[in-house]
Structures are given as structure tokens and as C-alpha cells.
Image: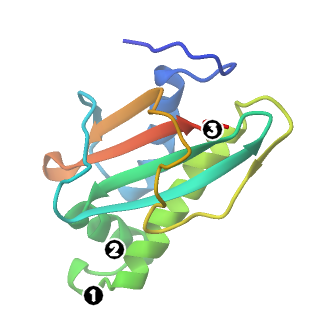
Amino acid sequence: MSITVDVPLLDSDALEGIVAVCVDSFDLELAPAAPTVLAGTPDVRSSSVDLTGAWPGRVLVQCPQPLAVRMAGVLFQLDDAAVNEDDVVDTLAELANVIGGNVKSLLPAPSQLGLPSSPAGTLAGFTAAFAIAAFAGADGLPIVVTVHPATA
């Protein structure tokens, strides 16, 4: 199902394509899954990046800790046991930055991409997500990406 929004060229299909390309380097077996909410789930790791300019908003990336560790291991070529907290933070920040940059490329100009924040900042000042892409990663662990328009 595709969700059409008031942002040119950005819908749930476009967001799913962006996420699929951005996580390809993590060697995960990905398949579209039903949208998943990770808020309140134990051991959820997150990172976000803000978009400013003609269309202000926030891109939020969330996944369970075991998947964040696995992705950090792939990115830094480490065994999962050797991955530390900084590796996890850096990995999720990089993922939010890359996904956010791809989303920015679809937004009206001028648009700028802020610096990633890990863990993700609060969603105060942002409306509910208008598009969600959820993928089942290795062992069925989800990666959830949401895009939140700013309220003001």
C-alpha cells in the first residue's frame, strides 16, 4: 500500500526503496513487513536527523539492540562480541544520515540536512509520521524508519 503525502516524490514506496538501498551494505536479508512501532520496546536503539528549509521535518531510525550490534559489526568488520557502544551509536547515526540525505534529495529546495542525533531526540514539535517503512532483518528483527513533519 502506498501512502501519498504532500511532499513531492516522497511516499511509502519511495521511502521503502531508500531504506532498502541504504541498508544493503549491512548484508541483511530484508523484506517488507507490516509497519512496526518500537516505542516502549526494551533495548530499542535510535538515531534521527533533522531536515530544514522548504520542508522541515525529522527522519527517525529505530531497531532492536541485537540488530544495531550486528550492523555495527558489519560496518566496522568486527565480531558482534567486539562491538562497543560507540560503534553502535556511530552506525545508527550514519544510517540516519544516509537515509535522511536520500529523503532530502526528494524534497523541495532549499532543503538542508542537520547532524544526526543518537539516541534520537524527542519528537516534540513534530507531527505523527506520515510514512513508515518497516523491514524484517535477520532473525525477524525490524528496522523502522519514520518521517515526521515539523509542526511549525
Q: Nearer the viewer, residue 109 or 54?
A: 54
Is mark 1 in CB contact (under 8 Å) with mark 2? yes
Left or right of 7, for residue 13: left
The image's colour scheme reads: rainbow
Residue at 34% across, 43% down? 144
Q: Residues within 10 Å of mark 2 (few under 14, many from 20)?
A: many
Left or right of 54, for residue 131: left
Q: Residue 83 location in percent, x, y?
A: 31, 83
Q: Residue 51 location in percent, x, y?
A: 68, 46
Q: Nearer the viewer, mark 1 or mark 3?
A: 3
Depicted 71 relative to depicted 60: above or below = below
Q: Residues within 10 Å of mark 1 (few under 14, many from 20)?
A: few
Is mark 3 in CB contact (under 8 Å) with mark 2? no
Residue at 30% across, 51% down? 28
Q: Nearer the viewer, residue 150 or 140?
A: 150
Left or right of 6, for residue 79: left
Position of the N terminus, as image quadrant, is top left
Q: Residues within 10 Å of mark 3 (few under 14, many from 20)?
A: many
Q: Find the distance from the CA under tag 1 to the CA under tag 3.
A: 32 Å
- The amino acid on which the numbered mark 2 sits, given as a three-letter code, is Gly
Q: Which residue is mark 2?
A: 73
Q: Residue 19 location in percent, x, y?
A: 46, 40
Left or right of 52, for residue 31: left
Q: Which badge, 1 or 3, is on the more N-terminal residue? A: 1
Residue at 20% across, 65% down? 43
Asked where in the image residue 32 lies, by quadrant, the reply is: top left
Q: Which residue is mark 3?
A: 103
Q: Find the distance from the CA under tag 3 to the CA under tag 2.
A: 26 Å
Q: What is the number of the mark on residue 82?
A: 1
Q: Nearer the viewer, mark 3 or mark 2?
A: 3
